[in-house]
Image (spheres, rainbow, N blue to C red):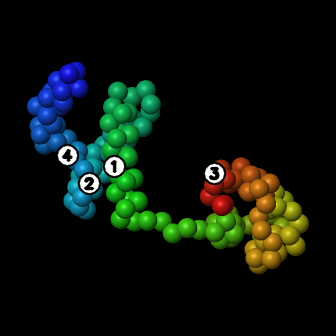
């Protein structure tokens, strides 16, 4: 019965909470903009920090935004070699500047698709570029 009383208390406050906060299930671009605006304000107030009193609200809103983004703006899968090319371009690296992989000729073969990245390469590259190893799979 505790759940029923809890729900009654929530129902009694929900409409007012939505009206004041703008928090709602994100169905439209307008809903999205409202929730992002509130989230931005929470970020400015320091709510990203886990000890902040409104951190939980920030996390709930971030989850809503993430779910909407995943549904409406799905990201294409990127092959690990394409990611490596991008990172090299961003950092202005040459093939010989990737000792994590090996010699320039090994890097060249990987970029040409003649060789695959090994798990050792991936671990080292993830560490160098501060990424999750999953990004290369």
From mark 4 to mark 2, how far is it between C-alphas?
10 Å
Q: Are marks 3 and 4 in contact (CB under 8 Å)?
A: no
- The residue indicated by pointer 1 is 64
Which of disc 4 and disc 3 is earlier in sequence? 4
- The residue indicated by pointer 3 is 132
- x and y percent of residue 100 in the render? 81, 57
Please state which of the two labelled residues, at mark 4 or mark 1, is closer to the viewer. 1
Q: Are marks 2 and 1 in contact (CB under 8 Å)?
A: yes
The answer to which quarter of the image holds residue 129 is bottom right
Which of disc 1 and disc 3 is earlier in sequence? 1
- The residue indicated by pointer 2 is 26
Which of disc 1 and disc 2 is earlier in sequence? 2
Q: Image quadrant for the C terminus?
A: bottom right
**Which residue does the image show at 41% across and 59% down from the upper left?**
70
Element carrying mark 3: loop
Which of disc 1 and disc 4 is earlier in sequence? 4
**Which residue does the image show at 43% across and 26% down from the upper left?**
51
Element carrying mark 2: loop
**Which residue does the image show at 36% across and 33% down from the upper left?**
56
From mark 4 to mark 1, how far is it between C-alphas?
13 Å
The answer to which quarter of the image holds residue 46 is top left
Residue 22 badge: 4
Q: Is residue 100 visible?
A: yes
């Amino acid at each position: 019965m505790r759940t029923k009383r809890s729900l009654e208390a929530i129902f009694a406050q929900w409409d007012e909470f939505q009206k004041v906060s703008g928090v709602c299930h994100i169905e439209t671009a307008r809903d999205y903009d409202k929730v992002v605006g509130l989230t931005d304000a929470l970020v400015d107030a320091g709510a990203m920090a886990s000890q902040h009193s409104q951190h939980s609200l920030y996390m709930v809103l971030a989850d809503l935004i993430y779910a909407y983004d995943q549904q409406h703006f799905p990201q294409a899968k990127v092959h690990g070699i394409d990611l490596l090319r991008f990172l090299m371009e961003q950092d202005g690296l040459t093939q010989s500047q990737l000792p994590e992989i090996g010699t320039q000729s090994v890097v060249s073969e990987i970029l040409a698709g003649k060789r695959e990245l090994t798990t050792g390469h991936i671990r080292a590259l993830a560490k160098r570029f501060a990424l999750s190893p999953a990004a290369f799979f």
